[in-house]
Image (spheres, rainbow, N blue to C red):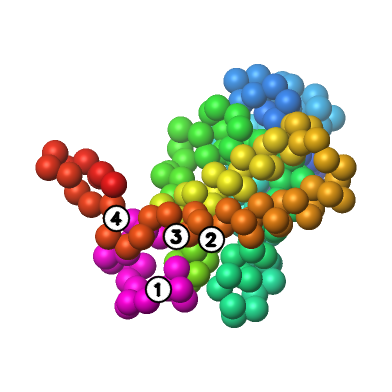
């Protein structure tokens, strides 16, 4: 049976927008079909018709946020110079968090939603992390004195560098969107880039190829 004409893509987007606000403000556990419908000015039956239920709505909220974030990262300027491209990616990362703080919180700061939704796969396999990992691999390869194999012997070095860079950018933007940085907005722009330029190369160099290996018990050890 086709869904009512009033249950269209415009209403679907409005429901996702309101559900995003609800999860960002009050957490995933607070999201209900009735509340999402009321926020969007529609009925609970519309939510069921468009999403199938509360759990599917919550997953769609995270998927939407991740898709928008991935698109922003893909649109970061590419110069062909690995270091400059990695910096541009970091700038695009922060810009998204500032432009869409609710979507960013849904992805990374709310238990049960986004990257922490039960149906989400490993974070290091998410498209947004893969973009960062690939950029880090190119930067490491460009500065390597010996042949570099990001998918083989040097895979752990790439993962460690990408995770360190993610921790730097994520920590900064969470402080910023929570209003905890002391500088005015125009100064934060400059200081953020300076932080990436200052700490980024050290994070890239912090785990040299071959520095992570299997220990005697099978654990990964430095």
Compared across the picture, whether 92 is left or right of 150 comes to right
The disc, 2 or 1, on the residue closer to the chain's N-terminal end is 1
The disc, 3 or 1, on the residue closer to the chain's N-terminal end is 1
Q: From which residue to which does the magenta span run?
A: 140-158
Q: Secondary structure at mark 1?
A: loop
Image location (x, y in percent) of residue 83: 58, 70
Image location (x, y in percent) of residue 64: 64, 47
Give the residue drawn at x 49%, y 54%: 203
Q: Secondary structure at mark 3?
A: helix
Residue 28: name its quadrant: top right
Residue at numbered disc 2: 201
Task: Please tell me the numbered disc located at residue 205.
Answer: 3
- The correct choice, above or below, for 135 with respect to 24 in the image is below
Give the residue drawn at x 78%, y 55%: 190
Tell me, yes or no, if residue 182 can be seen here: yes
The Cα–Cα distance between marks 4 and 1, rounded to whole angstroms, is 14 Å
Residue at numbered disc 1: 144
């Amino acid at each position: 049976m086709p869904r009512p004409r009033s249950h269209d893509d415009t209403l679907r987007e409005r429901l996702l927008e309101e559900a995003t606000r609800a999860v960002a403000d009050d957490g995933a556990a607070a999201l209900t079909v009735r509340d999402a419908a009321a926020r969007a000015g529609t009925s609970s039956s519309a939510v069921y018709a468009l999403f199938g239920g509360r759990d599917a709505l919550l997953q769609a909220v995270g998927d939407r946020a991740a898709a928008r974030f991935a698109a922003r990262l893909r649109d970061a300027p590419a110069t062909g110079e690995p270091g400059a491209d990695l910096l541009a990616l970091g700038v695009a990362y922060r810009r998204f968090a500032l432009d869409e703080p609710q979507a960013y919180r849904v992805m990374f700061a709310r238990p049960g939603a986004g990257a922490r939704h039960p149906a989400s796969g490993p974070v290091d396999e998410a498209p947004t992390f893969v973009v960062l990992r690939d950029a880090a691999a190119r930067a490491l390869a460009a500065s390597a004195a010996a042949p570099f194999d990001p998918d083989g012997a040097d895979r752990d070095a790439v993962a460690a560098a990408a995770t360190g860079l993610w921790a730097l950018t994520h920590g900064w933007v969470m402080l910023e969107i929570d209003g905890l940085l002391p500088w005015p907005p125009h100064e934060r722009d400059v200081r953020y880039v300076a932080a990436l330029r200052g700490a980024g190369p050290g994070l890239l160099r912090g785990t040299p190829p071959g520095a992570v290996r299997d220990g005697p018990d099978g654990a990964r050890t430095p």
